[in-house]
Amino acid sequence: MKFTHEQLLQTQNIAAQCADTVDVCKKASEKTANEDLRSFFSAMADERNNFLIGFEVLLKDEGETLENFIGTGVGMLHKLWVAMKEPFSEQRERRLLKETLRSEKIIDESIEKLEELGDMPAELENLIETLKESNAQAKLQLVLFANEKPGGTRF
């Protein structure tokens, strides 16, 4: 089964959002003083990069490419915001967690739009299901981090 034009566009959109997440999480992991957050953001960047590679392979099979992919406009603002903050304070870390959670919700919305388009090629459907599971786990972890008190205790 081949991609429809609409599926292709939506898949490229999800890939762009994953690319944004990779960049933001890499910067966040470099700048945060919290070791748990550093590990989380580093792992999240690696995981989203793996999805990006999966999307790249699927799109390549369709004759498309992700070369010169710069991501979404919102993602570019995220990257600029992260780059401007030196080093993160606890309040800035909380804001970054909330913004990252918002980004994950945007990916979920894009996945819903893709699913509304109807039947997908099996490879794409498998990748999307795995991404949905990953997003659910990431959102839970982001909420847990955001609800921590200074010193590592939960509210």
Image: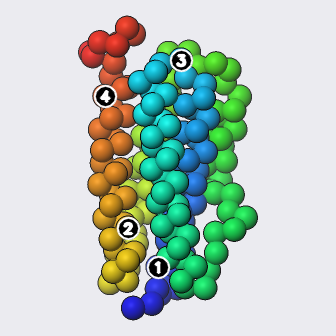
Q: Residues within 10 Å of mark 1 (few under 14, many from 20)?
A: many
Q: Quadrant of residue 149?
A: top left
Q: Which residue is mark 3?
A: 33
Q: Which residue is mark 2?
A: 127
What's the distance in space between the residues labelled 1 and 2, CA to CA? 14 Å
The numbered mark, 1 or 3, whose residue comes first in the sequence reads 1
The numbered mark, 2 or 4, whose residue comes first in the sequence reads 2
Q: Dots 4 and 1: beta carbons under 8 Å?
A: no
Q: Which residue is mark 1?
A: 7
Q: Residue at x 62, y 80 (%)?
A: 64
Q: Dots 2 and 4: beta carbons under 8 Å?
A: no
Q: Residues within 10 Å of mark 4 (few under 14, many from 20)?
A: few
Q: In the image, which disc is placed on residue 144? A: 4
Q: Residues within 10 Å of mark 2 (few under 14, many from 20)?
A: some
What's the distance in space between the residues labelled 2 and 4, CA to CA? 26 Å
Q: Dots 1 and 3: beta carbons under 8 Å?
A: no
